Amino acid sequence: MASFEQDFYLENPTRWQAFRRDVRLLLMLMRYALLWLTRGVAVRRAYKKAQASGKPVALESLIDE
C-alpha cells in the first residue's frame, strides 16, 4: 500500500492533475466514511451488547464479514 504522500503529493501540478488528485482524495474519504457508517455501527452495537452481557467481543468476526 502506497503512503499518502506517494498517492497525493504532486510537485508543480497542472490544474488538471490537481483536479484529478482532489477527486481521488474525495473518493477515498467517501470510502472511509461509508466504512465508518457500516462497519463502525456494527462494532459499536456489538460492543454495547457485550458490555450489557459481560462477554467479550470478537472484533475479527465483525470486521471480516
Image: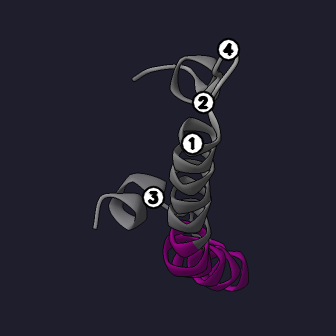
Q: Is residue 38 above or below residue 9?
A: below
| Residue named by callout 2 | 8
Q: Between residue 61 and residue 41, name the one nearer to us.
A: 41
The disc labelled 2 sits on which kind of residue?
Phe
Q: Between residue 18 and residue 62, name the one nearer to us.
A: 18
Estimate the spatial distance between the alpha carbons at disc 3 and disc 1, rounded to whole Å: 37 Å
Q: Between residue 14 and residue 22, name the one nearer to us.
A: 14
- Front label number (2 vs 3): 2
Q: Answer left or right for 22 relative to 63.
A: right
Tell me, yes or no, whether the two marked residues, 2 and 3, touch with CB atoms within 8 Å.
no
* 10 Å crowding of disc 4: few (<14), some (14-19), many (20+): few
- Of labels 2 and 1, earlier in sequence is 2
- Front label number (4 vs 2): 4
Q: In what quadrant of the picture does the C terminus appear? A: bottom left
Q: Is residue 19 above or below residue 61?
A: above
The disc labelled 4 sits on which kind of residue?
Glu
Callout 4 secondary element? loop
| Residue named by callout 4 | 11
Tell me, yes or no, whether the two marked residues, 1 and 4, touch with CB atoms within 8 Å.
no
Give percent across and percent down for residue 14: 62, 32
- Of labels 1 and 4, earlier in sequence is 4
Tell me, yes or no, whether the two marked residues, 4 and 2, touch with CB atoms within 8 Å.
no
Estimate the spatial distance between the alpha carbons at disc 2 and disc 3, rounded to whole Å: 35 Å
| Residue named by callout 1 | 21
Callout 2 secondary element? helix
Residue at image coords 60%, 30% = 8
| Residue named by callout 3 | 58
